[in-house]
Image (cartoon, grey):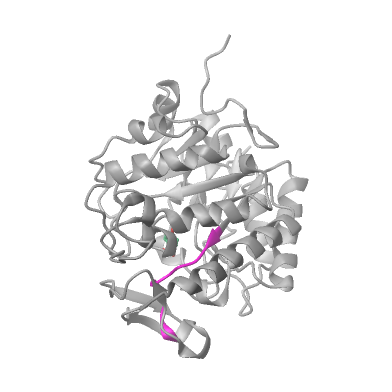
Amino acid sequence: MTETDLFSPLQLGSSLLENRMVMAPLTRNRATTDFIPQAMNVEYYTQRASAGLIISEASPISPQGIGYPLTPCIFTAAQTEGWKTVVDAVHNKGGHIFMQLWHVGRISHPSLQENNALPVAPSAICPAGDARTYTGLQPFVTPRALEVDELPGIVEDYRVAAENAKQAGFDGIEVHAANGYLLDEFLRDGSNQRTDAYGGSIENRSRLLMEVIDAVTTVWPANQVGVRISPENSFNDINDSDPQITFNLVAKRLSSYGLAYLHTIEGDMANGERKINYREIKDNFNGHYMANLAYDLERAQTAIKQGDTDMVAFGSLYIANPDLVERFKANAPLNTPDQDTFYGGDEHGYTDYPFMES
Ligand code: PHB
C-alpha cells in the first residue's frame, strides 16, 4: 500500500478530489461594477483546475456584506449566472470548486454600503486600520452594533446565497468565519462585547455561526459544507483572550453536523507566529481538516504524513503558479507572486503567470 501524501485522492462530500492540494480563497477584486464574475475570472479559475479543490474568492452574501471594491458577489441572479460560467469551465477541466460565503461585518466603509450606512458588527468597536475603498484607503469607522432581531435576516441572507451557489453548480460551500469578518467578530471576545445570547460564553459567541450552519445545511448536505477559522490571526485588528479554548470548542460544536472540512489558518498572517496547538483543534473536529498558512511542498507533505492535516491550502503560491500541482510533482521552480497586482487591475498579474514549459 502506498503512503497517503499530498497527491493522494480524497473523497470530499460528493466530490472525489484528485489530490489534497487546495487553491485557497483569494480576494482579487476583478469582477464587474455589478459584482458579477466576468471572462477573465473564468480564465483565471480554469487555469488552476488541476488543484484537488478550488475555493472561490470570498463572495459577499448581501450588499451589507461587501467591504471592498469589485468583489464578485452571490446575491443576485446575474451574479449567480456569472459564477455559473466559472463553475462550468472548471468542471469541464475536471476540477472541483466550492464557493466561499462572506459577510465582512465591520471591515467595510460607508462609501461601500447602501445609502452610506455604517458597517455592522457584534459591538460598536472601531478596528484599527483602513478600509480599501473606490477612492483609496480610508480609516475604518466605528460600526453599528447589530440588534438581536436583525440576526435572522443575516442568517437568511446566508441561506439564500447558499441556494444561489447551488444554482451556479458549485460542488459545495465554505462559510467564512475567519480573518476578522462578521462571523469571526462574533466568535472572538476582542470584538464581541455583547451581553445577550450572542455574547459572553463561547457557546453564545458561536451561536450566530451555528445558526448559519443550520440554515445552509437545509440547502446543502452537511458533507458539502466547509468552515474557515483563524484562531490567532490578528488581521483586521481582531483577537481572542484564549484562542485554544475558544476554537477547540468551536471545532467540537461544528462536529455535530458532519461537515466536509474545517479550514484553519494556522497562526498570524502578519508574522507567521503560531502559539497554540492546531492538532488539538483538528482532534476536536470529526471531518477532514485543511491546513493553511505559509505551507510549501515539504511542510505540506510532512503535515499530511504525520496525520496533522488531510488537505493543505495554498494562497500566494496559487496566485503565481496556475499549474502548482504539476510543479510540485516535478519539483520544478516556482513563479514569484507580484504583490502589486494582487488586488484589482486587469489580466496582468492575474491570468498571465506562465505555465511550466512542457
Ligand atoms: C483581503 O482582501 O485582504 C482578504 C479578504 C478575505 C480574507 C483575507 C484577506 O479572508
Q: Is residue 189 above or below residue 78?
A: above
Query: Residue 101 versus residue 221: which sits nearer the camera?
Result: 221
Q: Which residues are magenta?
A: 101-110
- For the point 58% across and 42% down, the residue is 323
Residue 154 figure quarter:
bottom right
Label tally: 0
Q: Is residue 313 magenta?
A: no
Residue 330 shown left or right of residue 146 in the figure: right
User: Residue 171 at x, y = what percent?
Assistant: 68, 46
Q: Can residue 265 be seen at all in this image of the molecule? A: no
Q: Is residue 228 left or right of residue 357?
A: left
Residue drawn at (43%, 50%) of the image: 336
The C terminus, quarter of image: top right
Q: Is residue 215 left or right of residue 252?
A: right
Q: Residue furthest front?
A: 196
Query: Looking at the rendering, which quadrant does residue 221 occupy?
Result: top right
Dominant SS in magenta = loop
Q: Is residue 109 magenta?
A: yes
- Residue occupying the far top of the picture: 1
Residue 63 appears at what percent x and percent y? 56, 77
- Which percent across, then down, holds residue 5? 51, 23
Q: Left of 269 or right of it: where is 147?
A: right
Quadrant containing ligand 1: bottom left
Q: Is residue 41 visible?
A: yes
- Of the 4 image quadrants, the one containing the N terminus is top right
Q: Nearer the viewer, residue 306 or 324?
A: 306
Rendered view: 14 above or below 338: above
User: Residue farthest to the bottom?
Assistant: 115
Measured from the top left, where is residue 172 in percent x and y? Answer: 65, 48
